[in-house]
Image (spheres, rainbow, N blue to C red):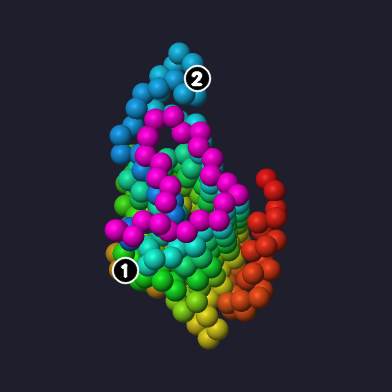
Amino acid sequence: AININDGFYGNHTLSWNVMFNTVRETSDHGAINTWDRQPYLSDALQSGLPSLWQHGSYIHHNTIFNNYNALWPIDHDDGSCFYEDSYNFLMYGGKKNYLGHSKKDHHQMYVYSDAGRDDFGCNTCLDYYAPRQGYSGWNEVYIENTCILYKNPVPYKIDDCNTADLFVPYLANNKIYIPKGTEAIFTCNVNGISTKLNLQQWQSYGLDINTTVQATPDVQTIIKWGREMLQNTI
């Protein structure tokens, strides 16, 4: 597994790999785990001007298998910041964001995110934990992604979603595929009550504009889409 935990400089790139989970003593994360528990002052971005701002890091064009009963193929944990994840093909797990800020997720393909474990809310395409206005959760983006679910019609788990005071990632232009005969469910507090919303209701709050929901395609179609995406260059 790959662990990035410096919280200092950024400027990492992980690309064009086939990855598997190799950490078996814990199932907390899959092939990639990041954290920024301890921020540092540095002049990484501008020489002679110390700040907490880092260079961006990039994870792109990887095929990641979330095997060994892991929770997430990419686990941006403990305050991870300044990551751009794109054009990755991720099997059997979704994306975790815990604290931190300034992470962008686009043109990803999440396949059967709900086919693995279902504890810790990890059986969705996006697991978004513990945003706190003022120090975490801002400048988070989840757009142009493909979310393919096997048995569960819930694409996201977003902590503290509240329509009276929305503080969630910017969601738009995603393609969600759910089992035939089901209706997509988006959960958020409405008037103080946890409520299951359909796509139209969810979009009425300005969320997931231009996002579509369709039936999960067959495996051959998914493989074709994955090949086309991985062959796309930035």
Magenta residues (range): 1-26
193 vs 209: above or below: below
Which sits in the foreground, 185 or 102? 102
Q: Main secondary structure of the magenta part?
A: loop
Q: Is residue 8 magenta?
A: yes
- Position in image of residue 115 (x %, y %): 44, 74
Tell me residue 139's x, y (percent).
Answer: 46, 43
The residue sitting at the bottom extreme is 181
Gap between marks 1 and 2 measured at Cα: 42 Å
Q: Residue 119 has which mark?
A: 1
- Mark 1 is on which residue type? Asp
Identity of the residue drawn at 40% across and 19% down: 50
Look at mark 2 in the image and give the residue it sits on.
46
Position of residue 101 measured from the top left corner of the image (x, y, whole percent)? 41, 42
- Report the front residue among 221 and 163: 221
Q: Residue furthest top?
A: 48
Q: Quadrant of residue 118?
A: bottom left
Establish if 182 lies above or below 18: below
- Tag 1 near tag 2, CB within 8 Å: no
Identify residue type, mark 2: Gln
Query: Residue at 47% of width from left, 59% of height from top?
Result: 20
All told, the count of numbered labels is: 2
Name the foreground residue: 1 vs 5: 1
Residue 209 visible in the displayed image: no
Query: In the rendered structure, does residue 6 fall within the stretch colored magenta?
Result: yes
